[in-house]
Amino acid sequence: MIYAIFAAIASGILGAMGMGGGGILMIYLTVFAGLEQSLAQGINLLFFIPSAIIAILIYTKKKMIDYKTVIPFALSGVAGALLGSYISGLLKNDILSIIFGVFLLVIGLRELFTRAK
């Protein structure tokens, strides 16, 4: 249980910083807690609702959100969420796990080998 708490705290911190805390939580839930990918995805989504609300309030207070820029991304994100939810319902858990692993690998390699500007 202590590892679950640490994973949740790390996920919340990284998520609030825009660094993909969901990746940490997904890895914990699938690898260490042994949950199927689809179940872990649902838990991950619900986990981030209160975390995102808190982060939004703080970022808004600090005037760190440009809402004119957010609107097209949010609307496109809703469309993507609908499509992604539909597609994930069609795929088997092992395929979802492979897609997630490849995604993490590509992002990790990009971060390792791309120089900061």
Image (cartoon, rainbow, N blue to C red):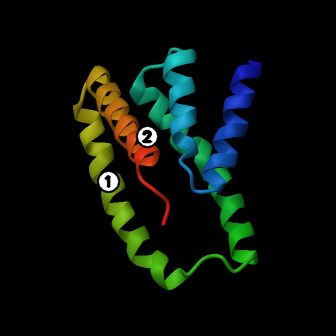
Q: Which mark is residue 50?
A: none
Residue 86: image quadrant is top left
Residue type, numbered disc 1: Leu
Q: Which residue is mark 1?
A: 82
Is residue 33 in sight in this rendering? no
Residue 97 in percent (x, y) is at 35, 26
Q: CA distance from mark 2 to mark 1?
A: 26 Å
Q: Residues within 10 Å of mark 1 (few under 14, many from 20)?
A: few
Q: Residue at x 69, y 38 (%)?
A: 10
Q: Residues within 10 Å of mark 2 (few under 14, many from 20)?
A: few
Residue in front for this viewpoint, 60 or 101: 101
Q: Residue at x 32, y 23 (%)?
A: 93
Q: Residue at x 57, y 16 (%)?
A: 32
Tag 1 or tag 2, which sits nearer the N-term?
Answer: 1
Residue type, numbered disc 2: Gly
Quadrant in the picture for the N terminus: top right
Query: In the displayed structure, would residue 78 be above or below residue 64?
Result: above
Is residue 81 in sight in this rendering? yes
Q: Residue at x 67, y 31 (%)?
A: 7
Query: In the displayed structure, would residue 11 be above or below residue 98?
Result: below
Q: Which residue is mark 2?
A: 108
Left or right: residue 65 versus residue 98 is: right
Q: Secondary structure at mark 1?
A: helix
Residue 42 in percent (x, y) is at 48, 36
Q: Secondary structure at mark 2?
A: helix
Residue 98: image quadrant is top left
Give the mark toward the camera: 2 or 1.
2
Q: Residue furthest bottom?
A: 68
Query: In the displayed structure, would residue 89 be above or below residue 28?
Result: below
Residue 52 in percent (x, y) is at 63, 56
Query: In the displayed structure, would residue 114 be above or below residue 24?
Result: below
